[in-house]
Image (cartoon, grey):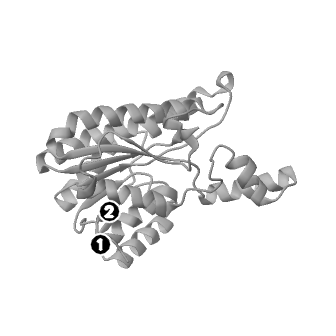
Amino acid sequence: MAVDFGLQGQVAVVTGSTSGIGHALADALASQGVNIVLNGLGEMTAIERTRAEMAETHGVEVLYHGADMTKPSQIVDMIAVAKAEFGELDILINNAGVQHVAPIEDFPDDKWDQIIAINLSSAFHATKAAVPIMKAQGRGRIVNIASAHALVASPFKSAYVAAKHGIMGLTKTVALEVAQHGVTCNAICPGFVKTPLVEAQIADQAAARGISQEAVMRDVILASQPTKQFVTFEQLSGVLLYLVSDMGASANGAAWQVDGGWTAQ
């Protein structure tokens, strides 16, 4: 039986939502009657198809804003457009992110700057622009899509881990500042999610190692995830819908670990 989270007619901005986790979360919100501002990279024909399909499937308004997450002025404009087009902004999902893997001594300076800008600073700029709107409304929900790497580290991911730890600090600080204004700020910290990118890596790893895809998933990719199962989009969406609903009003400043037990070790 479908659950009604009481979100009909609300407005959400979801960064990095043209594919992957961001798209799944935007679609979950749209399924609850939330009007959506999509954002992200991709070929414009494909983005328009995604936008139109989401709007038609769920009977909501769906806009696309192409803000570059490394450009603060464009991020601010995205929030302003959402408010101007819909008259309100109820939900902000800071999801945009990129990754680069290298030893610290070889880590390219430009990759560090890019990851910090997209994975951390963009959330600051979007939140800074959204909070005054939400305070004026007397209600708002900010959810930062962090990672298990907001809580623990892995080698060769210095920029990503630093950015995600920073997201957790930003989440807690904003939560304290907005707590008496009907606004909350939380972080969802996923473990490994079976995205198309990961699926391609499974096949490549299996061929390279001469082992089955099942063995790659269990012993390589999911080595740190005790369940040995990927986190699903539906599981992340369930946590998100709780947090942005009235049921989640007292959840504030928390790291919501959806990682199969990874960070319990």
**Upstream in the sequence, badge 1 or badge 2?**
2
**Quadrant where the image shows the C terminus:** top right
Q: Which mark is residue 36?
A: 2
Determine whether 90 is above or below 102 in the image.
Answer: below
Q: Secondary structure at mark 2?
A: strand
Which residue is drawn at the image coordinates 64% and 24% (left, top)? 104
Q: Position of residue 230 (x, y in %)?
A: 60, 56
Disc 2 packing (10 Å; few <14; some 14–19; many ≥20): many
**Quadrant where the image shows the N terminus:** bottom left
Cα separation, mark 1 vs mark 2, equals 8 Å
Which residue is drawn at the image coordinates 51% and 35% (left, top)? 114
Q: Position of residue 258 (x, y in %)?
A: 49, 50
Task: Look at the numbered discs 1 and 2 and tell me whether their residues touch, using CB distance below 8 Å.
Answer: yes
Which residue is drawn at the image coordinates 36% and 78% (left, top)? 56
In this rendering, the count of numbered labels is 2
Residue farthest toward the top in the current orientation of the protein: 105
Q: Position of residue 168 (x, y in %)?
A: 41, 35
Q: Is residue 18 visible?
A: no
Determine whether 81 is above or below 3 in the image.
Answer: above
Q: Is residue 46 visible?
A: yes
Q: In this image, 7 relative to 26: left or right? A: left
Displayed quadrant of residue 159: top right
Task: Tell me the kind of residue under disc 1.
Answer: Val
Q: In this figure, which residue is indicated by the disc labeled 1? A: 60
Displayed quadrant of residue 5: bottom left
